[in-house]
Amino acid sequence: MTTAELLDRSAVTPAFRDAMLQFLRDGRSSERIRFGYGCPAVKVERTLHKALVEYPQVPVESIEVAAASGCEYFRGQMTVRTASDETHVAFHWDCKWRAEQEGWRDWFGFPDQARAAREFGWDCFRVWDEEPRGALVMQASRKATPISIDASFA
C-alpha cells in the first residue's frame, strides 16, 4: 500500500493530510512535518509511512523527525502529536540489517542493502520503540512491539 493510500485510510487531521500530500509532492519540511537538513526526504517518507501503519486511528496533527542518516541506516527519534497527546518513538531503519535477515548478498558478497531498501522500503525498521506521553498509544489500533536497542545502535 502506498503512503498516499495509507493516508486516505487514516484518522489524521485535515491539516496534517494536506501537509503530507504537499510533502509527498515536494519532499520539504513544513510546520506539520518537521525534519532537519540531514534527513533525506525518502527516509523521512519511510518513517511517516511506518507511523501511518502503526497509528491508523490516531488524529495526528504533526510529526517531527530528528535523525541521522547514513548509507544503510536512518535512526533517531520521532515525535507524534495530537491535539492533546504526544508520543516519542525511537527508531532505526536499517536496510543492511534487513538484507542480512533475508540472507541477500550482492555481487561482492556483502549484504544487498540496495535490494532490501528497494523491495522492503518502509519495512526495514529494526527498532520502533515507543515512549508514550499520554493516551496516544492507547488510541492506536495496534502497538508496535518494542525491540531492545543493542550496543551497535548506541
Image (cartoon, helix red, strand yellow):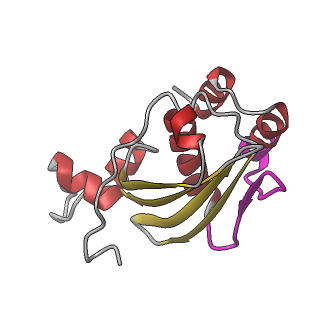
**Magenta segment, which residues?**
22-39
Q: Is residue 136 above or below residue 4?
A: below
Seen at 27% across and 76% down, the residue is: 152
Using the rendered image of the protein, determine whether residue 37 is visible from the camera's viewpoint: yes
Magenta span includes 139: no
Q: Residue 21 is drawn in which quadrant? A: top right
* Residue ranking furthest to the top: 9
Seen at 41% across and 45% down, the residue is: 118
Seen at 44% across and 44% down, the residue is: 121
Depth check: 7 or 106 in front? 7
Residue 68: x and y in percent read 53, 73
Horizontal side, residue 20 vs residue 110: left or right: right
Residue 29: x and y in percent read 77, 59
Q: Is residue 11 above or below residue 108?
A: above
Horizontal side, residue 65 vs residue 154: left or right: right
Seen at 72% across and 42% down, the residue is: 24
Horizontal side, residue 34 vs residue 3: left or right: right
Residue 145: x and y in percent read 33, 44
Depth check: 15 or 119 in front? 15
Image quadrant holding the C terminus, namely bottom left
Depth check: 14 or 95 in front? 14
* Residue ranking furthest to the front: 134
Q: Residue 58 is drawn in which quadrant? A: top right
Magenta span includes 24: yes
